[in-house]
Amino acid sequence: MSPKFRLQDRYVFKIYSNEETRKHIHVVKAEREAKFWPEPEIELAENFGFHSKE
């Protein structure tokens, strides 16, 4: 399950409830996806296709 909880400027923000216990957020736009840890500070965990400026 990957509920979309926000859509902004063609970026989709999702949370996968069954993926792992550590809180994280996926950001998707077209064929690109990135995963962020929001705590203790926002940190990029994985990046698949986004440029550094995005």
Image (cartoon, rainbow, N blue to C red):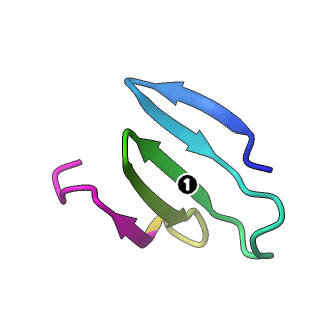
What's the residue at 80%, 76% (across, down)?
21
Residue 44 image point, x, y percent: 41, 69
What's the residue at 38%, 23% (across, down)?
9
Q: Mark 1 points at which residue?
A: 26
What's the residue at 37%, 47% (across, down)?
31
Residue 24 relative to residue 41: left or right:
right
* Residue 14 shown in magenta: no
Question: Number of labelled discs?
Answer: 1
Residue 42 relative to residue 32: left or right:
right
Residue 31 sits above or below residue 43 on the image: above
Quarter of the rendering containing residue 3:
top right
Residue 24 image point, x, y percent: 63, 63
Residue 34 sits above or below residue 37 on the image: above
What's the residue at 40%, 27% (across, down)?
10
Residue 30 image point, x, y percent: 37, 39
As drawn, which residue projects farthest toward the front? 31
**Type of the residue with mark 1:** His
Q: Residues within 10 Å of mark 1 (few under 14, many from 20)?
A: many
Where does the magenta region start and end? 44-54
Residue 32 relative to residue 37: left or right:
left
Label 1 residue SS? strand
Residue 49 image point, x, y percent: 28, 59
